[in-house]
Image (spheres, rainbow, N blue to C red):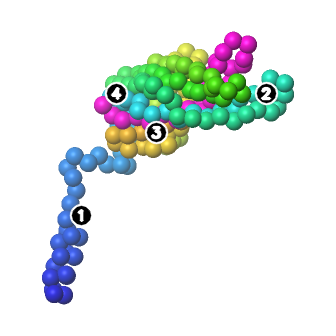
Amino acid sequence: MKRFALLLSIGLMIMSCKKDKNQIDPSAPLSDRLPGTWEITAVNYSGMLPDQQNPNQGTPFAGEGENVSGYFQFDSDTNTGAFDINFIAKIDIGLGQPLAVTVNQGQSGLWEPTDQDAYVKMWSNDTITNWKVITNLSTSQVWRTSIVLDYGAGLDSIPVQVQAAMTKK
């Protein structure tokens, strides 16, 4: 019985050491993994709704985006890329019913990983968007950035943290 257990343990160790030929090396640079199209599958957002009477105070808000759609697309030959992110954010402004804000953000231009793959910088002309890399896997990524949200007439625009999850198409 002991011999069988020993043989079984050795067999399991050998099988666990086998490498899948299709596995992408997780230490591969982000610039090697990103080219192609990535579909945005989920969005989380958070921010601070300013108090109109006292700008130094505010009400925090957070949530999951509804009706999420969008993509990231990267070309390695030209280092050009684009993103388009769309979702509905619901913000409670104290009216009993949350304010539904449609968020449509996009950009195209050049891209590059920075700070040892901790960020992906995208820019065109004077517009720069830095995406913080939260999860960096071969077929899934999670990134975070700050966008400016215009949430209605007579109200201010506010910075909102947006975290987007995406999968490779």
Residue 37 is labelled as 4
Residue name at image x 26 percent, y 48 percent = 23
Residue 142 is labelled as 3
What is the secondary structure assignment of the residue under circle 4?
A: strand
What is the secondary structure assignment of the residue under circle 3?
A: strand
Q: Which residues are magenta?
A: 145-169
Mark pair 1, 4: CA separation: 32 Å
- Within 10 Å of disc 4 (Cα), the crowding (few <14, some 14-19, many 20+) is some
Instruction: Kindly check if marks 3 and 1 are in contact, taking CB atoms under 8 A apart as contact.
Output: no
What is the secondary structure assignment of the residue under circle 1?
A: helix
Depth check, mark 3 against mark 2: the one in front is 2
Amino acid type of the residue that numbered disc 3 sits on in the rendered structure: Val
Where residue 86 appears, as percent x and y from the top left, is 48, 22
Depth check, mark 2 against mark 1: the one in front is 2
Mark pair 3, 1: CA separation: 29 Å
Mark pair 3, 2: CA separation: 31 Å
Mark pair 4, 2: CA separation: 40 Å
Residue name at image x 49 percent, y 33 percent = 43
Quadrant in which residue 75 is drawn: top left
Mark pair 4, 3: CA separation: 14 Å
Residue 51 is labelled as 2
Q: Earlier in the sequence, mark 3 or mark 2?
A: 2
